[in-house]
Amino acid sequence: MRPLNENDVTAEELFVNRRKFLKLGAAGLVANSAVMDLLAKEFMPKANLQYVKDSNPEQLVLNSFEQITSYNNFYEFTTSKEGVKYLAHTLKTDPWSIEIDGLVEKPFVIDVQDLIKKYTLQERIYRFRCVEGWSMVVPWVGFELSQLIKDVKVLSKAKYIRFETKYDDEMFPDQSRGLFAALDYPYAEGLRLDEAMNPLSLMAVGLYGKTLENQNGAPLRLVVPWKYGFKSIKSISKISFVEKEPLNSWQKSNPNEYGFFANVNPEVDHPRWSQKRERVLGQLFKQRTLMFNGYEKEVAHLYKNMDLTRYF
Ligand code: MTE
């Protein structure tokens, strides 16, 4: 399926078809995908990014822009998934600088737009699976993390990459709640360097052809599609190359439930729920969760000889 834009449908078409839909809807045709597509178009943003399209060889069915931007985890705003988008306007992304430090030839600070300009943007249609058991399919736009890593000339001692979300309690209300905050901020995440170099690891700057909405982690976020969603850190302001495995926010808050690797694995249950199945946003019935979220061919070699029940 190719990303749609508002020019794909005229206002008149929409009006006529919406009336048809309302009539047919009563007759139980809600699942008719053509009609659902048409409704989804109504909320389609105006594309403002130039990028190479993903041919979507697996024919993944995309979640709508509305679904992807209305059901979010972004604890810096609130723990209410439906509430994030109403609070996210306080995030100011222009100007926004990214600090790159640690074990690199020359640490530096760069404006996010200058960083993005260096790369050809690509669309990546990925499955996205949250550790809580819901999932969606998102047409991200971004560039490969491996490109950035090559450019910054990492020193041989570096074994891991660590990311940090901005700390600014005027932009992020939950950061000003001190002891009562939902998490210990700044939100942090990490990858082993070989994981970060995998061609699937993406620095996302948009979705559905448009610059990221604040609630999805503007202006720059990580997307690691074979890992649970919490690894995909939002609104990054610092990237560090380090020797030791970094502690991520969820591991820090509850080490018995969340590990460093967080690979999607239907055989390893969360201590409080099964990971065998998932609810795709907008679908009535749950579906089977795939090993490494369906990216086994691309990433299984990274974990050869590792006990995945121990390194969860
Ligand atoms: N990044 C930051 N900074 N803060 C967060 O609370 N939540 C994580 C991840 N990145 C989170 C974050 C979790 S738990 C998930 S499932 C995904 O973002 C959700 O991404 P989405 O809202 O774009 O679907």
Image (cartoon, grey):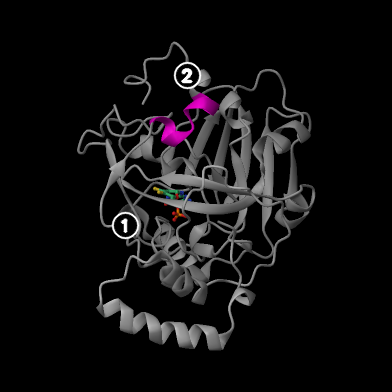
The residue that disc 1 covers is 283
**Does 192 appear above or below 21?**
above
Q: How far from the left and from the top, in percent, is residue 168?
A: 53, 59
What is the magenta segment's predominant secondary structure? helix
Marks 2/1: CA–CA distance: 32 Å
Task: Kindly identify the residue that appears in the image at 67 percent across and 58 percent down.
Answer: 96
**Does 50 appear above or below 130?**
below
Q: Amino acid at mark 2?
A: Tyr
- Secondary structure under the numbered disc 1 in the rendered image: loop
Instruction: Choose top left, top right, bottom left or bottom right for residue 159.
Output: top right
Left/right placement of residue 243 relative to residue 152 reads left
Q: How far from the left and from the top, in percent, is residue 16?
A: 47, 87
Q: Amino acid at mark 1?
A: Gln
Instruction: Choose top left, top right, bottom left or bottom right for residue 81.
Output: bottom left
Q: Quadrant of the C terminus?
A: top left
The residue that disc 2 covers is 303
* Magenta residues, start to end: 291-299
Left/right placement of residue 304 relative to residue 9 reads left
